């Protein structure tokens, strides 16, 4: 299968209300299914939310009690992977008979991760990617992913992977995904700035891949009344204005960008365009110089504590 219809969903969370956000997601999935899409991409932190403007009660060197309450509320809106919420999202994919990529806030113990989940058209959770490097204040509330969750999934509709928001500015991450043969580059984000469009076009052109970037559109009305964000309390205030886009392997915009509203952007694509584009530039193939440059990727899961029983410990000490 080389020709397919893809979509990015520009929509916002209902902050701190994950069941309501899942209901909203169900509606968008139904609309995308009506468009006949075979792959739909939702924004960064769509399930669990991106609490833009919230300080979490922190200044350099101090954390205040109200910030701890904010973190608790955020933790409660996050989801386990796998868990009942991922089962429900899988049911959306199965009903669509489409692949689905969605940004979530993943809860693992007391730590939160900004994660992208991949679902198959039968509803199966195919894999996940944890954001490697939270940006700025995000580091207050999100942990760092590791090399064990940077998949490029070989599916019947193409090789699908994801880089979340400013991860797209990490050259080594990009090169590692190019080397895995990605041709459907998913970029869930909340970056609403115009320069983001240039970045998406650059990645498409550099990697000779289709880029599908879904950005949230969220207003102050999507947050609870006691949401103390610095933008103010006018319900019509736009917190995240969108800017979703789909780009071809030659850097051409084929859908979007759209701002200031919810939207479903679709495009009909031909994966053979990836091969056509790599005729003169394949940065992980004929345009690489491994005699000069090399990249090593550690795919080991980095666990802070390792437990051994007597047998496994003895085996480990013998190996080392």
Image (tube, grey):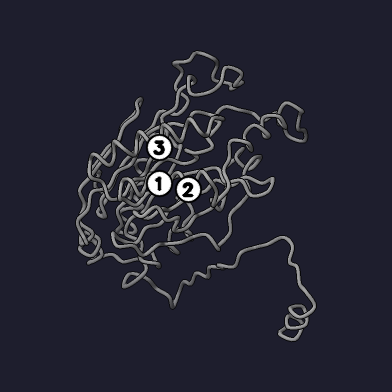
Query: In the figure, is residue 115 to the left or right of 61?
Result: left
Q: Outermost residue toward the bottom?
A: 318
- Residue 34 percent across, percent down from the top left: 24, 39
Q: Residues within 10 Å of mark 1 (few under 14, many from 20)?
A: some
- Residue 96 percent across, percent down from the top left: 31, 46
- Residue 270 percent across, percent down from the top left: 20, 56
Q: Are marks 1 and 2 in contact (CB under 8 Å)?
A: yes
Query: In the figure, is residue 281 to the left or right of 316?
Result: left
Q: Which mark is residue 91?
A: 1
Q: Which mark is residue 231?
A: none
Disc 2 target residue? 87
Query: In the figure, is residue 76 to the left or right of 29?
Result: right
Secondary structure found at label 1: helix
Position of residue 290 relative to residue 84, above or below, is below
**What residue lies at 45% left-to-right and 64% top-to-bottom?**
176
Disc 3 target residue? 215
Secondary structure found at label 3: loop
């Amino acid at each position: 299968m080389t020709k397919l219809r893809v979509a990015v969903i520009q929509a916002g969370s209902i902050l701190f209300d994950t069941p309501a956000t899942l209901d909203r997601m169900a509606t968008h999935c139904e609309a995308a299914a009506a468009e006949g899409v075979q792959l739909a991409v939702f924004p960064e932190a769509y399930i669990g939310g991106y609490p833009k403007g919230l300080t979490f009660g922190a200044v350099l060197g101090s954390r205040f009690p109200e910030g701890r309450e904010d973190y608790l509320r955020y933790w409660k809106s996050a989801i386990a992977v796998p868990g009942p919420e991922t089962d429900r999202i899988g049911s959306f994919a199965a009903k669509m008979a489409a692949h689905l990529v969605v940004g979530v806030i993943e809860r693992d113990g007391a730590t939160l991760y900004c994660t992208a989940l991949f679902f198959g058209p039968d509803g199966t959770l195919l894999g996940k990617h944890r954001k490697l490097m939270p940006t700025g204040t995000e580091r207050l509330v999100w942990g760092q992913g590791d090399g064990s969750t940077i998949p490029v999934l070989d599916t019947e509709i193409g090789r699908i992977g994801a880089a979340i928001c400013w991860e797209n500015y990490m050259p080594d991450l990009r090169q590692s995904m190019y080397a895995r043969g990605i041709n459907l580059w998913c970029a869930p984000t909340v970056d609403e700035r115009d320069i983001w469009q240039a970045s998406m076009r650059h990645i498409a052109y550099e990697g000779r891949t289709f880029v599908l970037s879904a950005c949230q559109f969220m207003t102050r009305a999507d947050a609870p009344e006691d949401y103390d964000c610095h933008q103010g309390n006018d319900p019509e205030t736009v917190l995240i204005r969108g800017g979703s886009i789909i780009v071809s392997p030659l850097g051409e915009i084929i859908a979007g960008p759209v701002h200031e509203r919810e939207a479903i952007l679709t495009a009909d694509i031909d994966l053979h365009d990836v091969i056509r584009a790599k005729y003169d530039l394949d940065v992980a193939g004929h345009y690489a110089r491994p005699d000069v440059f090399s990249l090593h990727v550690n795919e080991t899961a980095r666990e802070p504590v390792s437990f051994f029983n007597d047998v496994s410990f003895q085996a480990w000490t013998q190996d080392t």
